[in-house]
Amino acid sequence: MVEETPDRIRDAVPDVLDRFRAPELRLPPAGLRRRVSLTSSRSEYDATGERLARDILGVFEANRRRDEEYPRWLDFGCGSGRIARHVARAPYVGRLSGVDVDAKAVSWLARAYPSGDFRAIHREPPTPLPASSFDVVYAVSVFSHFDERATDAWLGEIARLLRGGGFFIASTLSPKLTWTRPDLTEEDHRRLQRDGFLFAPGSGPFNENGAFSSRERLLERWGRVLAPRSFEEHGLAGYQDLSVWEKRGAN
């Protein structure tokens, strides 16, 4: 793309030098950076990942029990590690794992960060991961693109992966963000107002789909599987809603 040329030129030398840097300092190649952003810019990729990680860690800190440890984390939809590379630096994160359907992105991440456990998964659950193997699972810009069938299926799988008392942190799209989809019809808006949920398929890849959920709908639907802990409207980078859920029961 012509608009990408300045970023590619500016980042060419740092991209080459990444081969000689420690794993925690490397960034994925331009093509993988471009998959999760409007640009392949190294600085934009790194700064956005840091901000998203800060918001996730912030709601975790606000909800965690001080007498418990949470060393086992899973990035659900990790991609090439834009958020994971920052989350992994938190002192209470002992081991960070990640899963994604994007095999190319996960393959790069697994090579760059061999100390973690990053693997590609199928688009349908279950994953090959053992039950009750995580203290915290987080998903950014994943459930914001699922229809209700996929949402229910993957919520069940995440509940299986969490230990009792573990947390699920997820971002979702507020009904206030329908301005991002000018193609929605009047009937779409009525359905969203009536049901508190609207899945709007996009015309391209997965991340062009939109799943808009009200807080009340999340409490009613997700609350069947996990216990609600907190909800922050536009809590993720001032854009997506951010909620925290807890798996009921003992370990």
Image (tube, rainbow, N blue to C red):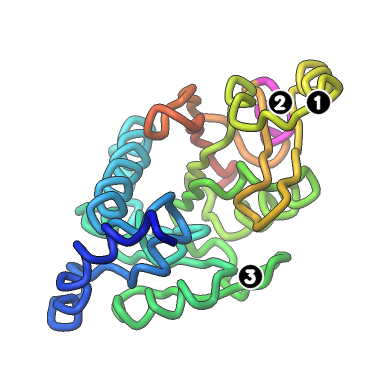
Classify residue 194 as left or right of residue 220.
Answer: right
Occupied quadrant, residue 13: bottom left
All told, the count of numbered labels is 3
Is residue 250 positioned above or below 7 on the image? above
Q: Main secondary structure of the magenta part?
A: helix
Is residue 126 positioned above or below 200 on the image? below
Q: CA distance from mark 1 to mark 2?
A: 21 Å
Q: Where residue 134 sits: x, y (%)?
A: 47, 59
Is residue 46 positioned above or below 103 on the image? above
Q: Residue at x 49, y 47 (%)?
A: 140
Mark 3 or mark 2: name the one nearer the start of the chain. Answer: 3
Q: Residues within 10 Å of mark 2 (few under 14, many from 20)?
A: some
Mark 3 or mark 1: name the one nearer the start of the chain. Answer: 3
Magenta span covers which residues? 216-223
Q: Residues within 10 Å of mark 3 (few under 14, many from 20)?
A: some
Per the image, the residue denoted by label 3 is: 127
| SS of the residue under disc 3 | loop
**Does the segment drawn in magenta span residue 219?**
yes
Per the image, the residue denoted by label 1 is: 185
Which one is in front in this view, the residue at disc 3 or the one at disc 1? 1
Q: Residue at x 60, y 51 (%)?
A: 207
Numbered mark located on residue 217 in the image: 2
Q: Which residue occupies the foreground of this view, 52 or 29?
A: 29
